[in-house]
Image: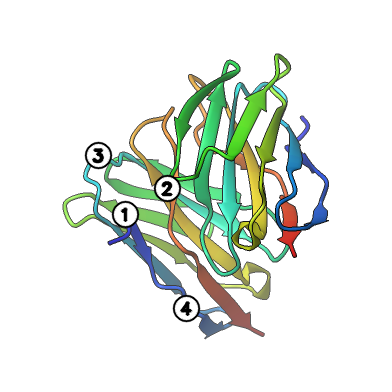
């Protein structure tokens, strides 16, 4: 059973640029959620995708957008990067309707905006 | 007021001690309660989950949920240096809805 993999692991971008982060779900999982974790804070919910549709969104502006593909992999896109977007971005997969509850997280992408 | 409150610590205890970690919450709709462990430079790892009120034990770990007080706890018995990590409480209203995390407690076990 494969876990959740995220790429890249680290990224440095300039303010105003755009970035795309990628996530491969754990085998058998059908839902992907994205979280932003600032240093010393708990993860903050960005949005969730189920069957390629957005299925809930946190308090993030529209410049944060996402996609889920038929193989349940996902992308997080952030436009017009701001310095405060510097954080660890976590992808988590889960199986809605399954017997086991809880998310499986990837190791994250560390984004630094300069 | 945050939906989930957690003391950030840091908490430092000697090896072998019993550790108690706690969270309070305000949303009475929460029904699923979880504890995650996060090592430095890693993603959170699910340790325990509980549905509704009650206790759940898994090896050295015990999770307790008191919905009447909106209070959850994680106990670690016979703590080991390898338990040193950040512990995140988390909760949600249903199996399909978003999970809300606390801010995490940094725990250090001294050999």
Q: Which residue is mark 3?
A: B29
Q: Is residue B91 left or right of residue B109?
A: left
Of badges 4 and 2, the one in the foreground is: 2
Q: Which element type, helix, strand or loop, lies under badge 4?
A: loop
Q: Which residue is mark 4?
A: B9
Residue B35, x across and y down, in percent: 48, 53
For the residues beneath circles 4 and 1, the answer to whether they share a chain is yes
Of badges 4 and 1, the one in the foreground is: 1
Q: Dot 4, how many residues are within 10 Å of its Cα: few (below 14), some (14-19), or many (20+)?
A: few
Q: Is residue A89 above or below residue B24?
A: above
Q: Residue at x 75, y 65 (%)?
A: A114
- Please report whichever mark, 4 or 1, sits nearer to the chain's N-terminal start: 1
Residue B41, x across and y down, in percent: 73, 62
For the residues beneath circles 1 and 2, the answer to whether they share a chain is yes
Residue B92, x across and y down, in percent: 38, 40
In which quadrant is the N terminus of chain A drawn? top right
Quadrant of residue B28 in the image?
top left
Q: CA distance from mark 1 to mark 2?
A: 8 Å
Which chain contains the residue that carries disc 4?
B
Q: CA distance from mark 4 to mark 3?
A: 27 Å
For the residues beneath circles 4 and 2, the answer to whether they share a chain is yes
Residue A17, x across and y down, in percent: 75, 49
Q: Dot 2, how many residues are within 10 Å of its Cα: few (below 14), some (14-19), or many (20+)?
A: many
- Please report whichever mark, 4 or 3, sits nearer to the chain's N-terminal start: 4
Of badges 1 and 3, the one in the foreground is: 1
């Amino acid at each position: 059973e494969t876990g959740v993999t995220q790429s890249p692991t680290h990224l440095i971008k300039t303010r105003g640029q755009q970035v795309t982060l990628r996530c491969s779900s754990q085998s058998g999982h059908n839902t992907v959620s994205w979280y932003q974790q600032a240093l010393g804070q708990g993860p903050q919910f960005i949005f969730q995708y189920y069957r390629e549709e957005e299925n809930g969104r946190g308090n993030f502006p529209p410049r944060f957008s996402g996609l889920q593909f038929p193989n349940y992999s996902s992308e997080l896109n952030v436009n017009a990067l701001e310095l405060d977007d510097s954080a660890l971005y976590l992808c988590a997969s889960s199986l809605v309707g399954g017997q086991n509850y809880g998310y499986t997280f990837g190791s994250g992408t560390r984004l630094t905006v300069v | 007021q945050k939906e989930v409150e957690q003391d950030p610590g840091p908490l430092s205890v000697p090896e072998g001690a019993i550790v108690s970690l706690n969270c309070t919450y305000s949303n009475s709709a929460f029904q699923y309660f979880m504890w995650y462990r996060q090592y430095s430079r890693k993603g959170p790892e699910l340790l325990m989950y509980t549905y509704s009120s009650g206790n759940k034990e898994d090896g050295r770990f015990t999770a307790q949920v008191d919905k009447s007080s909106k209070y959850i706890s994680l106990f670690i018995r016979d703590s080991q240096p390898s338990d040193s990590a950040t512990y995140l409480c988390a909760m949600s209203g249903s199996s399909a809805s978003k999970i809300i995390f606390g801010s995490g407690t940094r725990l250090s076990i001294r050999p």
